[in-house]
Every structure is written in structure tokens, then in C-alpha cells.
Amino acid sequence: MFRKIVDAVVLPSEITGFESDYLARMNRVALWFFALHLPIFVLVAYFNDTGPMTAVALTSAVLVGPFIAYFTFKNPRAISVSYGITAMLMGGLLVHFGQGPVQIEMHFYFFALLAMLAMFGNPMVIATAAVTVALHHLLVWMYLPASVFNYDAPLWVVAIHAAFVVLESVATCYIARSFFDNVIGLEKIVKSRTAELDARNEDMHLLLDNVQQGFLTLDRTGAVAAERSAQVTRWFGHVDAATLPELIEGVDAGFADDFRMAWEQVEEDLLPVECNLDLAPSELVANGRNIEVSYRPLGPVDGDWTGVLVVMSDVTSQRERERLESEQREVLHLLDRIMRDKAGFLEFFAEGERQVKLIASDEIEDRVLLGRVIHTLKGNSAVFGVHRIADRCHEIEEAMKESGGRPPEALRAGLDEAWTRLRSSLEMIVGDDDNSHIEIEDQEFRSVLGSLLADVPREDVAREMIAWRLEPTRRRLTRLADQLERVATRLDKRGIEVQLEDHGLRLDAERWSGFWSAYVHVIRNAVDHGIESIEERRALGKDGAGHILVETAMESDELVVRLRDDGRGIDWARVRERAMERGLPADDRADLVAALFHDGLSTRDEATDTSGRGAGLGALAQAVEAMSGRIEVSSAPGQGTTFECYFPRRVLSCERPERYLAA
């Protein structure tokens, strides 16, 4: 117990720089405080008739001690201890010179000074002062009692005074030591905590330098802290960047731009920071590596955030695995399609091969024509489920829209590489393109057999047999219906009723492949632009999810390929507005129909991966014109739209029979 008391009263021998500066300041202030006692005590002595000159002499004598200590002692604590004695002697003088009716009240000065001495943060000062006042009361009471009390006080009164001094001294010593430990000793605490933090930081640096993730923090202004994991430096180099975009833009400028826009929302602080950070980009590409980026606000759980932790993870292997798995699923899907319609897929593949070569090369100089080829390849790839190609085409279209020029070489090379991988996956099947077999219906066989038995002229029978080499339009219409269903599923418009009418017609598959390839744009537009959502149709009083008719027929010596839907119809006012923006004629319905096929005109404000670029109908018009055909469009608001492609009979005529014998 005694040891604990000694440890509490006696301070550690080390005096820190902070304590030394603090005590120097307090000792200087206390010295002036004691010096001011001289004029005050003279006044007290004057008004109480206790000898002003005696006050001058005695007060000056007491002041000699603190002045000698202040100018000679090197240890600031020793000066403070001397002030403890000085304070109590000054209290004794005040009681002596204040003899009279309030002499007892003058004793409060002892307790006030004991409390004030706690500012030195040294219990020894309090203890010294307590001993001094105890000796003062006892000795002066014995030899000059009138100097202490204004009445004949017995010893027990002195003891009571001493008891109060002891009680206050104990409390004041505790306060002084607490003040030393928590304020004056703050420098030690800071050093200790700093040492602990340094040790932890060393451990953290060791961890951050060896983890495979990138860690860095941003403050509320978006500034990057100097501390970051070594992986960040490995990915982005030794960049002295003030902000995250400055750190990233050297390897991924697109990510940097997107982050700047997202951080503007963070600074506006209109929404919770978590919501704004959700708008920030989540992945970047650095030197061929896919880096996933996540953000976590830092700060009190229920309080305001103080910064953002940015965590970066290398997901290159994961993305490659996902790509391979996606391509494998895609190949399995294509194999299923090939099993059901090999001829149709091979035709798409052959046309796609040609289109990819055109896009990858500089053969097409006209940007509009190149855009049509890209858009057509994208549309057909999407409906056949070849999303790797459709996605590449979409990226190229976005780049062309942004730059206003030709597609970047890197994106074209990426498309060619994706097509090459697709070809490699399907090489065994794609290489088998033997379509020399003939499929005929039983009715067609009976018709030819009947003609032979009826002695029909041989050339007529031969022409009838040549038709067997042609492709039934029913097969094409069925493929279109499949494509329509896939587009509807992707746009969440399932349940559309599709009606097919082919009227037994056949066409040369090779000759008409370009037209059918472009015709897919009409299918996509009918589902995307034409047919309303089920909710919208119900609000308009329409039944079902929508109805689309796709038909081939001979009308007035012409072949017509017709598509009719019962959707919302064409917004002619919107078409007129867009046509006038582009300086196109917009005086009558014929002008507006012509505007529909103008490249770049779309009633949509934003393009999607399905439609909205205004290139699809232009590609269709080009394909129809190549077949000497024409297009007619009719539409009524709320009732639907009809697209009709008319072709002269001569494009249907069969070749001479001798051609097939030579083949």
C-alpha cells in the first residue's frame, strides 16, 4: 500500500519536452502571480491596521524563495515544489494581515491555493504545500495564536483545520496525477501509441505488400492516400496521382472518365454515398488483366462517412473461365440449332463469314454501307444465339457513334478473332456444307409423276423438277418465326402469336440469302418497336400478347414478302421530327416512308443491342433494290404496321435445265 502511495505521489524521473515546456510556462505565470501578492497584502494590512510596512517586509522575504528557485533551479519540477511552499506561506501572511472579523474566512485562501497547485500536475507540490500549511498552523498557533484565529481556539480546532487540508490534499493529489498522466504525459501516451501503430503499420505493410489485391483509400475530396498496397503499384506503376482517375487513366481511360462522373454525384451528396458509389464503374482492364473494383464507405456506422476504401481484385482467370463457359454453352446451343436446321445455320455462317471479312478489311470505304453490314451481322448473330459476335458488333457500333468515323482497328480485330474462335469450335460441322441433296413433299412427287403419266411436255416436267432444287419459303418463314420468338424472349414479350403463310412457294436459297439476312431487321423492329407490352396492350383494350403475320405470296404477277403486326403503329409525327432534324423531305406520307429507310434515322432516343440505330431498314432497302424490288409501308396508330417487299416474277424464273445437268 505504501509503495502504491509513493508511486502515485512521486512522478517518473523522465521529463518530456512537452512537460518541460508546459512547466516553464506555468512556473513563469506563477512567479508573477506571487509577485502581485506584495501590493495586495500591503492594502490588506493597511485596511486592517496590521502594519503595511511589515507586509512589505514579510511578503518580500517570502518572494525571495520562488525567485531564487526560478532563476537557479534547472529542474522545472523543483521550481514547482518550491511554489507549493510559497503558496502556503502567502496564505499564512494573508491570514495574519487580515486579522479582524473575517480572519477565519481568510483561511479559504489555503484551500483555493491547494486546488490551484493541481495545475502543475505534480502530487509532490500538493504534499509539500499540505505539510507547510500544517506546520504553519501548528507553530504559529503555539507562539502567536492571534495570527491564525480571531478567538481563543483550542488544539482540536487546529486539528479540524488540518483534517480539511488533508482531505483536500488527497483529492488534489489525485487530480494532479490524473492531469499529469492524461495531459502533461500525453506526449508519452502519443509516443507509446505511435510505437504501437508503427508496429501495426509494419505488419499491415507486410500484409499489403504480399496480398494479391489492391487496396487504397480516398478522402471526401476524392484524393488518394499515399498508403496503398504494393499490388496497386504493380498494376499501375509508381504514379504520384492525386485522384483515382489520374492513377487509372494511363491504363483505362474509359474507367477514369466513368469514375469522374460517378464521383460528381458523390460530391453533390444528394443520395446516400452507398447509392452514389453503386454508379461507379466496377471493372477495368490494366495491361490485359481484368481488375474488379469495389467501394466501401469509411466512417461511423450511423454517422457521416470520412472516406472510401477501394478494393481491387484480379479476376482475369475468372473472366476467362466465364468466357470459355459462355462459349461452350453457346456452341451447345448452336449444335442444337444445327441439328434442327443445318442448312439455315450454314447459310447464316457463310454470310457471316463474308460480312466479318468485309468489316475486318478496308474493302468498304463508305461508312454508311459498312454500318449496314455491321448491323445486319449483329442482328443475325443475335437471333441465332451467337452472342459473342453480336456483342462485338454492338461495341463497334458504339465506337462508330462516339467517334463519327470508321471503327477502330482493335475492335475489328477483336471481331475477327471472335469469329475465328467460333469457326474453330464448329469446324467439323461448318466444313460439311454439302447441300446437294433434294427434299420434296409427297404432293410434289405425285404432281411430277402425274405429269409424266399424262404426257406433259418434257420441258414443263423438267422445270417442275428444277423447283425441287429450290428452297421452300415455308422453311424461311419458320426460321423467321424462331428468330422472332428469341427476340421476344429477350425483350420479355413472350406469347406473341405468329402466323405463317407460304402458299407453297420456293426460292433459290443462294440467290435470296442476302435478302433474308437483311429481312431479320423487320422482324426485330416488329417485336421491339411495334408490339406493345402486355400491360400496355391491356390498357389499350387489346387482347393477348400480340399477333404477327409473316407471308410469302404471288399477287398480280409479283412475289410479295409481307409482315403485318397489330402493335402500336409507326409514330409518324416522330418520324417527321427526326427527318426534319436531318434535313430530309417530310411533306407527305411518301417522304416519311422514304425517311424510314434513311441511315441513322430512328424514333428511339437511345440505341440498344436490339434496335435504335436506324441502320437495319437501310440494309433491307439495299437488299430489296439489289433484287429489283420495292418496299411499301402502311401503318395506323394503335392498329399496327405492314411491311411489304414486292419483287417482279422474273427474279423467280428457273434456269435452263441444262445448267443442272452440267452441275
Image: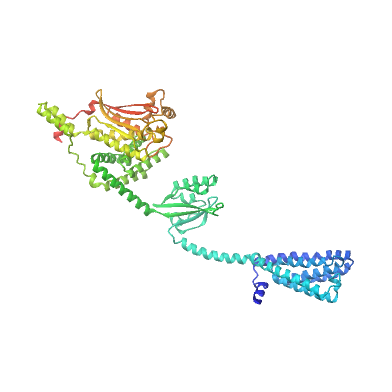
Q: Decide which of 280, 555 is in the foreground and name it.
A: 555
Q: Is 276 placed left or right of 493 in the picture? A: right
Q: Residue at x 51, y 47 (%)?
A: 263
**Quadrant where the N terminus lies?**
bottom right
Residue 79 visible within the image:
no
Q: Position of residue 643 (x, y in %)?
A: 33, 29
Residue with the most extreme right position: 49
**Image: 87 above or below 607:** below
In which quadrant will I find the C terminus?
A: top left
Q: Residue at x 75, y 74 (%)?
A: 131
Residue 317: x %, y % from top left:
37, 54
Q: Residue 459, located in which quarter of the rendered image?
A: top left
In this rendering, position of residue 78 left or right of residue 529: right
- Residue 571 sits above or below residue 17 on the image: above
> Residue 142 location, x and y as percent?
83, 76
For this view, does 173 lie left or right of residue 103? left
Q: Residue 551's image quarter?
A: top left
